[in-house]
Image (tube, coloured by chain):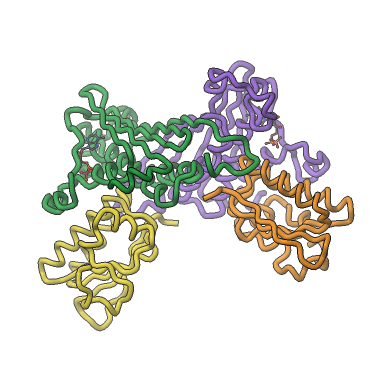
Chain colours: A yellow, B orange, C green, D purple
Amino acid sequence: MKSYELVVHPVENEADTRKADVIGCLDSHTVVGFERELQSVVDSGANVVILNLESLSYISSAGISALMGLTHRLRKSEGELYLLRPTEKVRRVFRTLGFTTIFRIVDEEAEVGSTPRS
Amino acid sequence: MKSYELVVHPVENEADTRKADVIGCLDSHTVVGFERELQSVVDSGANVVILNLESLSYISSAGISALMGLTHRLRKSEGELYLLRPTEKVRRVFRTLGFTTIFRIVDEEAEVGSTPRS
Amino acid sequence: MSTTPPGSPPQEFIDLELRCPVQTGVLNPLRTFIATLARQSGFSEEQVEQIEMAVDEACANVVRHAYKHLGVSCDLPAEEQSTDKKVRSSCLLRLRVEIGEGCLRVSIIDTGIGAHNKPKGVESLQEYQEREGRGGLGIYIIRKFMDEVEYETTPESGTMVTMTKFVTPAAKTAEK
Amino acid sequence: MSTTPPGSPPQEFIDLELRCPVQTGVLNPLRTFIATLARQSGFSEEQVEQIEMAVDEACANVVRHAYKHLGVSCDLPAEEQSTDKKVRSSCLLRLRVEIGEGCLRVSIIDTGIGAHNKPKGVESLQEYQEREGRGGLGIYIIRKFMDEVEYETTPESGTMVTMTKFVTPAAKTAEK
Ligand SMILES: Nc1ncnc2c1ncn2[C@@H]1O[C@H](COP(=O)(O)OP(=O)(O)O)[C@@H](O)[C@H]1O
Ligand SMILES: Nc1ncnc2c1ncn2[C@@H]1O[C@H](COP(=O)(O)OP(=O)(O)O)[C@@H](O)[C@H]1O
């Protein structure tokens, strides 16, 4: 069993939207691979990235920083990073630290593009 | 969160049958409490004991020995211990060590009393 | 403590120590270890998560920063990594855990650069955002999630951070 | 090893050590620690479970048997327990873990009664049943679940059991 995996979904209709599942733990051990794989997703022409966090069991400051970096890069080109359905544990970390006002956290894919920053 | 709990169900029709859920880990840390609680179940007049192992996440030799002890005690008075739906992990341990031929492991409560030793 | 299983011997004062090499691969095992200890010592699930994360951040800092000047850090590119086995095996991460009545204290100890590079986190999330990727979030998290945090550094003997959490810090939580 | 996440630095040889008090409360944290280490070192889930259980059995033996003659054992009734803090704190359980390419080796070390009470498990399940509750299952499990097991005892320095498991012991498994 791997302690981390990024499963990138095949591109469908919207050419500049990419979806991926983040599985396992995002810590200083796994973040290097995560950032590299994220970069290749962006390089493939993504402007809107949806990361499904349903199976993300742990995130450390290293993982949060990687998400912050991507958020900034995408916003520079009017894009956005959406975090889909984080677990209660990850949500609690975001909330306690104040990241719920920075990240776009959504519960349904349909909300993508229509969610005001909460 | 407790690392172990025994939840004894209220007695229904059959006066000499008792049912309980074993929750958590059965190891050298928790086995002392487990044996004491099992004893009071037997003392309450049980001849047939059904232990639901669906939520037993780990069992060590100490836990197995406790189950063996109870099996022997109940069989002396023509009774029986039934182990209901152990997880794949616990089942694998029983199987690899050879305990599947000693314990009565059942998947449905209806099988109680009718299962030949497999 | 409150969740000692009925019938098991009373939980005594626990004092244990762990010595690991400074590799990111030890972080996940260390997290599950400390989380299980905290959980069975009576902390709530949210508190367990906070202890887990604070300890992870401090350990990650040892792996990343403490021995970087010696060429031992996961942040260095391969060509800047020391290949000297003696150097690498002398770079240790030490964890000391003490658990008493309603209280857990963890010290994360290294013998690295210490006072030559005093640990400094951001004071607020705003400061973190302004820094734009230049770190500081780890120590912010440690201070936010633990009830008491103390950093000690000396030039010769590295860094030791000691963090304490209490089982029911009702006042503390409300205060934050 | 095979499951090192892509992009993270290559997993080096890991050599770590843990010192715990001899209390049953450390067993669960130790199990989760060793299981997480084994899992990310490439062992299958079934192998992880076997390592977890073998290590638990050896550690439980230290907590139960190694220091019983000194009044430090979870098997003793309260009135036979030593209350001497110096004695209790000198009773340690040491765990050493070495992980190399496709191989995990754990030593469980105590400074207890050692050769005065040589560890002996049953040879078969039948022997275990015939003994009717007089133990021997723990060491049977350790030998069954690990690929190599070695017990060393000396009168002065206690017991050390070293157990090794290989990631793909195809031959071994078939043999058993
Ligand atoms: N154990 C340590 N040894 C040396 N320097 C440290 C140690 N811990 C923290 N630091 C320093 O403190 C800074 C802030 O740490 P932290 O808040 O965790 O953020 P980050 O690690 O992302 O930079 C680090 O960049 C580093 O310079
Ligand atoms: N570390 C140890 N120190 C002293 N004696 C031990 C140790 N480990 C095992 N033993 C001895 O070996 C015996 C068999 O151990 P085991 O197979 O685990 O069964 P059990 O612990 O149930 O008796 C124990 O009863 C004990 O006498």
> In this orientation, which residue lies closer to the viewer: C27 or C23?
C27
D33 vs B36, left or right, is: left
Residue A88 image offset from top left, x and y in percent: 38, 61
**Quadrant hosting residue A73:** bottom left
Ligand 1 position by quadrant: top left
Residue at the image point whose x is 70% and y is 29% from the top = D77
State the residue lying farthest toward the right.
Answer: B77
Q: Position of residue C10 (x, y in %)?
A: 59, 35
Q: Position of residue D12 (x, y in %)?
A: 36, 41
- Find residue B16 and report its image quarter: bottom right
Q: Residue D15 appears in which quarter of the rendering?
A: top left
Q: Residue at x 12, y 50 (%)?
A: C131
- For residue D9, above or below residue A1: above
Residue C123 position, x and y percent, is: 18, 44
Q: Residue A7: tell me if it is visible.
A: no
Question: Quick one: C2 or C152, which is closer to the camera?
Answer: C2
Q: Is residue A110 above or below residue A118?
A: below
Residue sticking out furthest to the top: D156
Counting the numbered discs, the total is 0
Residue D32 versus residue D21 in the image, above or below: below
